Image: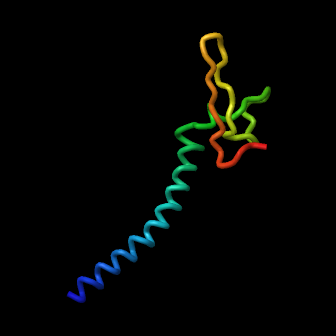
Amino acid sequence: MTRAIVLALAALGAAGWAGSALAEASLERGEYLVQGPMGCGNCHTPIGPQGFVMDQDLTGRVVEDSPAFRAVAPNITPCAAS
């Protein structure tokens, strides 16, 4: 019985440790996906005369503005652009 309790507590402790490691991996994975294969910047990064304005990466822009509709790709950065 004591052995079962010790194993259960060890498993709970390992799960708590793994949870924080998993959160860090999720952040890294999210950044990889946003900057890589998902191509979020294609719509969410402003375009200037020379192409994408990378110092405003993911700060949003109007993608389409026509009589039929207006499509806006909003700011998806953690904080507002200045």
Q: How is the image coloured?
A: rainbow
Q: Is residue 32 above or below residue 3?
A: above
* Above or below: residue 37 compared with residue 43: below
Q: Residue furthest left?
A: 1
Quadrant that contains the C terminus: top right
- Give the position of the N terminus as an image quadrant: bottom left
Q: Estimate the x, y position of residue 70 in percent, counting from the top left.
A: 63, 20
The spot of residue 22 in percent (x, y) is 46, 62
Left or right side of 21 for 54: right
Q: Looking at the picture, how far across and down is residue 53, in whole percent?
A: 75, 36
Residue nearest the viewer, comparing 66 with 33: 66
Closer to the camera in the image, 7 or 34:
7
Place residue 28 in its image quadrant: bottom right
Q: Position of residue 24 (x, y in %)?
A: 53, 61
**Residue that appears at 62% across and 31% down:** 73
Identify the residue at horizontal 72%, vertical 32% (top origin): 46
Q: Residue furthest top?
A: 67
Q: Is residue 12 above or below residue 1?
A: above
User: Which residue is most to the bottom?
Assistant: 2
Q: Residue at x 45, y 72 (%)?
A: 17
Q: Residue at x 44, y 66 (%)?
A: 19
**Count of picture labels:** 0
Q: Is residue 44 left or right of residue 11?
A: right
